[in-house]
Image (spheres, rainbow, N blue to C red):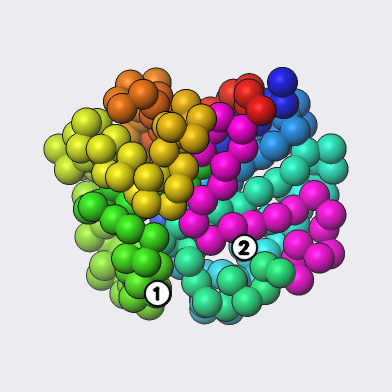
Amino acid sequence: MPRACFVSDLHLFANRSRGDRHLEAIRRAAEEAQHCILGGDIFDFKWSTLPSERDTVEAALHWLHDLSVRVPECRVEFLLGNHDYHPELIEQLPALAADVPNFEWERFFLRRGNAFFLHGDVADRKMTAARLERRRHKFRHRKRSNLHHRAYDLLVHSNVHDVLPRAVYPKRVVARRILSYLRDVGHGPETGVEHVYFGHTHRAVNGYAYGGIQFHNGGAPIGRSRYRILELEICE
């Protein structure tokens, strides 16, 4: 069976991210897999510390190109999240896919055999495909001020970031909302989906069972939060 790894919520270019500490581990996981799925919010335009949005776009494209060419035997599949759903980045992704044979991208989700991959912002509320698209387009990527950055850093260092996801994203509620979205886009459990891999909530989930599906989330490398690269075999 094909092997895959799932990585999400690195929030690269943001102060709060520890994602750069995991880059070599991501490359090693991709070298051993046929699919490396990047599950959104790999980059963070809203909280980027780079000088401009253009600089963040270029850095993101360079990162995707670099990972892809380093693992030529693995298909790198980039899903957009709310923090990297940026119009200038999206505009450049088709050219990157044309230039790099083992790179591809999708806006919202990816299905591989019995596994379904998505960023997970559908867990914020009951969501349809149309509602998610409208919500993504409204998301504000405007860079935050230094004051905002300092306030967020204090929040992360206070350990609130570890506690908040458990309160905001109960596993059962998250699973129910994701399952509703799956059915809306025609990929419910009745179509053979057995596993869902998602990010966004920054809460680690290891095989939580709901509605005939097992849900998996690797967490986020923010503050002291737990984080791991998810590895799996795809049953086609």
Q: Nearer the viewer, residue 155 or 136?
A: 136
Residue 47: quarter of image = bottom left
Q: Which residue is drawn at 64% across and 57% down?
A: 105
Depicted 75 relative to depicted 170: above or below: below
- In the picture, the quarter occupied by the N terminus is top right
Q: Name the residue under label 1.
A: 137
Residue 208, x across and y down, in percent: 33, 22
Depicted 161 relative to depicted 225: above or below: below
Q: Is residue 177 visible?
A: yes
Q: What element carries label 1?
A: helix
- In the picture, the quarter occupied by the C terminus is top right
Residue 40, x across and y down, in percent: 49, 52
Q: Can residue 178 be seen in this view?
A: no
Tell me the crowding category of disc 2: few under 14, some 14 to 19, or many 20 or more residues within 10 angstroms, Cα based: many
Magenta residue span = 95-116
The kind of residue on which mark 2 rests is Ala
Residue 191, x across and y down, in percent: 49, 35
Q: Does the magenta stretch include residue 96?
A: yes
Residue 172, x across and y down, in percent: 22, 31
Marks 2 and 1: in contact by CB < 8 Å?
no
Left or right, 116 with respect to 146, comes to right
Left or right, 40 with respect to 98, comes to left
Residue 29: quarter of image = top right
Tell me the crowding category of disc 1: few under 14, some 14 to 19, or many 20 or more residues within 10 angstroms, Cα based: few
Q: Residue at x 31, y 27 (%)?
A: 211
Q: Which of 161 and 130 is in front in this view?
A: 130
Q: Which residue is drawn at 75% across and 33% down?
A: 34
Return the mark for residue 60: 2
In terms of sequence position, does the residue under pointer 1 or pointer 2 come before the other? 2
Q: Nearer the viewer, residue 71 or 128?
A: 128
